[in-house]
Amino acid sequence: MKKTSPKKTNSLKKRLKRLSQEQAETSKNRIRRKFIDRLPHIRQVRLLVVEWAMIVIAIIMLSITQSFRYTESYATSSWDEGGTYIEGSIGAINSLNPLFANTASEQTLSRLMFSTLTTVDYSGHVGLDLAKSIQSNETGDSWTVWLRDNLKWSDGEPITNADVLYTIKTIKSPDSNNIYASNLSGVEVSEDDSGALIFNLPASYASFASALNIPILPEHILRDVPADLLLENNFSSSPVTSGPFKYNATQSGENADEKTVYLTENTNYYKDLPLLDGFIVHAYSDKGRLLSALNSGEIMGTASLLPTDDGEVTNPQINKKLTSISSGVFAFLNNDSHIFSNKSLRKAIQQGLDMRSLRAPLGDEIGLDYPLLESQISINNYPALPEYDPDAARSTISSWTEKSEIPETVKLVTVNTGYLPALGENLKYQLEQLGFTVNLSVVEPTQDFLITTLRPRDYDILLFEIELGSDPDLFAYYHSSQASGSGLNLSNYKNTLASDLLLAARSTVDQGVRATKYESFLKYWVDDAPAIAIYQVNMAYFVNQNVKSFSEDSRLVTPTDRFTDVLHWSTVKSVKNRTP
């Protein structure tokens, strides 16, 4: 084999290097002559260049548009199965037993985990849940309830009449101290030979079906637990459920009052399975921590903020839904207290409060003058409210305080939720301007509040939100029989004629007769001044725009009615081909 000499190799390298340099120089000259030297001439054809550029851009845009339109012709986006929805709320989680659901967090979990005999449907009216049918006799004092077939608890055990009978017995027990006792006051329930549940009422009640919106407990687990020990039972921390989701786990948060509860789909739920694989509820100790979680994307939605909090929501992905609910905030004047057993003092407050000032900081909330909503029933003639006259009110109050050697302090109580603390401060200021000495207490809405404050009526004035319901029934709040520790007559209002009107209104299904009775009742309510109506509540729901939550077409009676269509909530969106 011939070997190339070093001399020839070096010569070849030099030739290649020279050719490379010549080609580079030639290329530079061509670029300069063909492009750079001609750039000054572009001004002479600039219009032609712009026209061609616009034509090219138009062709590109038309191509993109055609591509999208073509895609839409055979494909569509839809919400799909899978994913976990994460909701935040304010309020401690002390118990997962639905009979003791006092805070917003507990009520949310109760609605997600437990079915009820009746429920509120999409239209805001009473519908059926575990009950297959509900019928009353002609007089409306006896109701027959049939359960659906093949109902099951999340552990696979059947849901039966025994569970309903146990639950009703537990709710009625004075030892259980639960939140549903007033729904079933005086009601007796039994099972007949045909397998139906018979509810016998102490009097006719045309809307009794709405009172059966109560969660049912598993008798096979709790039958041997005394009512007074039910709250402390293991069921309160790890329940068997009947709703669309079942309990999975609980995780403690950074603060002692914060917990996260993990739920998964309940495959034994009698309806279709939810699109979601799971639901997580984060319970936060205060608004600041909740807002931080919402803004950072840690949670997807919350119903625990006020409509006026939207300025503090900085996450651009968060939208606000504003929906009125059938709840109202009232100042209940305790007719049994030494101060407000005096009707003239109650009327002085009615006359001396500046309602515009009270309502001004409430943003989108709707002013409320009476304990009935227009969405519930049509009243032709509402009684006139006293005109605002603070001087006359001060004169009445001054006359009373002069007769008392030691003027008493008004005990004003409210709960630490929503607008109520700030509203309580405003109310306190106005009462002091009228001549009262006022002590304001803002307490947490826990079981202790129910036992130590609400039941014994340990207040002179209670600033509190109550559910007005889908049906106009004021019996629970103003009938004299409910002025007790187990009732919800928070004013301890006792007027025989007014009570008779409430009984007559609840015992008839004729809406015209019912409206007439309520119209007459309102005259007594205004004249006796057992409470001052302040505003109807709006629920603000802040939610990430990339998930699907409740439909804004649904009419909500309570905030948890947002879960009426929870089976259709989703966090997963996909593109699917259209079927021919």
Image (cartoon, rainbow, N blue to C red):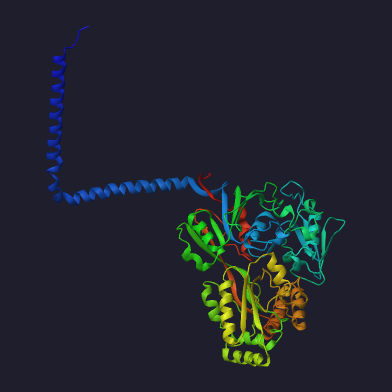
Q: Quadrant of the N terminus?
A: top left
Height in image: 187 above or below 256? below
Relative image position of residue 165 (x, y in whole percent)? 81, 58
Q: Residue at x 69, y 66 (%)?
A: 448
Q: Nearer the viewer, residue 112 or 393?
A: 393
Q: Nearer the viewer, residue 253 or 343?
A: 253
Can I make out residue 389 in this image? no
Total residue callouts: 0
Q: Residue at x 38, y 49 (%)?
A: 65
Question: Is 299 displayed left or right of 504 in the figure?
Answer: left
Question: Is 99 displayed left or right of 564 in the figure?
Answer: right
Relative image position of residue 184 (x, y in whole percent)? 77, 67
Name the residue at the top extreme: 1
Where residue 10 sits, quadrant-wise, is top left
Can I make out residue 479 in this image? yes
Relative image position of residue 140 (x, y in whole percent)? 79, 69
Height in image: 26 above or below 570? above
Height in image: 554 above or below 17? below
Name the residue at the front extreme: 406
Name the residue at the right extreme: 193
Relative image position of residue 77 (x, y in whole percent)? 50, 49
